Amino acid sequence: MQYATNQYEGMIAETITIPGQNGDLIGAYVARPLGPGPYPAIVVIHHMPGWDEWYREVTRKFAHHGYIAISPNLYHRAGHGIPEDVAAKVRAAGGVPDDQVVADVAGMLAYAKSLPNCSGNVVVFGTCSGARHAYLCACRTPGFAAIINCWGGRVTMTAQELSANQPVAPVDYTKDLTCPMLGIFGEEDQFPTPAQVAELEQALVTHGKPHEFHMYPNAGHGFFYYDRPAYRQEQAMDGWKKIWAFLQKYVA
């Protein structure tokens, strides 16, 4: 995105509710550029630390770059409070059920496509557990134009890791993926490990799915999070450049 000092800039950002699974109203933070568009949209899926301030900022970041950005609270049914406390409750319950996540995100996709200023191109983005959810949703819900997976753990899973809430490893749905994927990973991450990233990439190759992976040295889990010790400035800035180039290629 190129800037000029005399260009008009404006956006609106607010918390609304959008129907999810079974018509349940899910809280969502929505940011969009002011103007008629049409704009592509992006569903921004939060991580296990919860529906927190970093995700508010990233939602506005996408809107600043010309996207209708929708960040749903996938922990909505667990109650409200400090994001970390809500996330702890969800973690103790074994995470949110995969089927519920898929249905909630499908509601966000339908909402985005219904907007008169949406171009119809909708991306799904996530980090950490949100990237796992993004992959799951992109495979199981037709209609996404692209997926951005930032260090998604448990996309590949052993039989021992499966549970009632997560009965199928997302990688096992790879054959159903209908859109290109960008993957951003750190070499020092243990969740996923480089070997698990390689396993995911092999599944994409096997099924002939277009993808672009970037594995960053001297970076671990969550290296975009500027408010945490894991932050790596150089790798994070390059990672964002890769995201903007990928979006420009497939959906802008």
Image: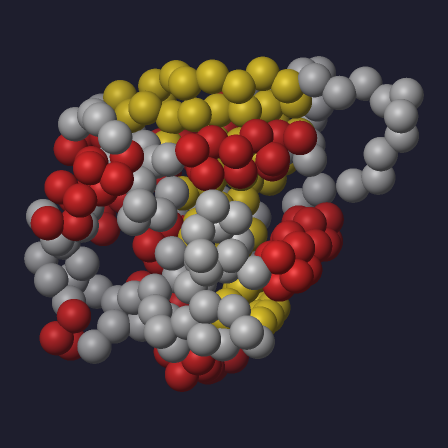
Residue 119 visible within the image: no
130 and 53: which one is in front? 53
Residue 169 visible within the image: yes
**Image-quadrant location for residue 162:** bottom left
Residue 38: image x %, image y %?
69, 26
User: Residue at left 90%, top 21%?
Assistant: 6
User: Residue at left 43%, top 25%?
Assistant: 29
User: Residue at left 59%, top 23%?
Assistant: 32
Judged left or right of residue 231, residue 52 is: left
Residue 135: image x %, image y %?
40, 57
Q: Quadrant of the N terminus?
A: top right
Residue 45: image x %, image y %?
40, 43
Judged left or right of residue 54, residue 18 is: left
Q: How is the image coloured?
A: secondary structure
User: Residue at left 26%, top 21%?
Assistant: 25
Q: Quadrant of the C terminus?
A: top right
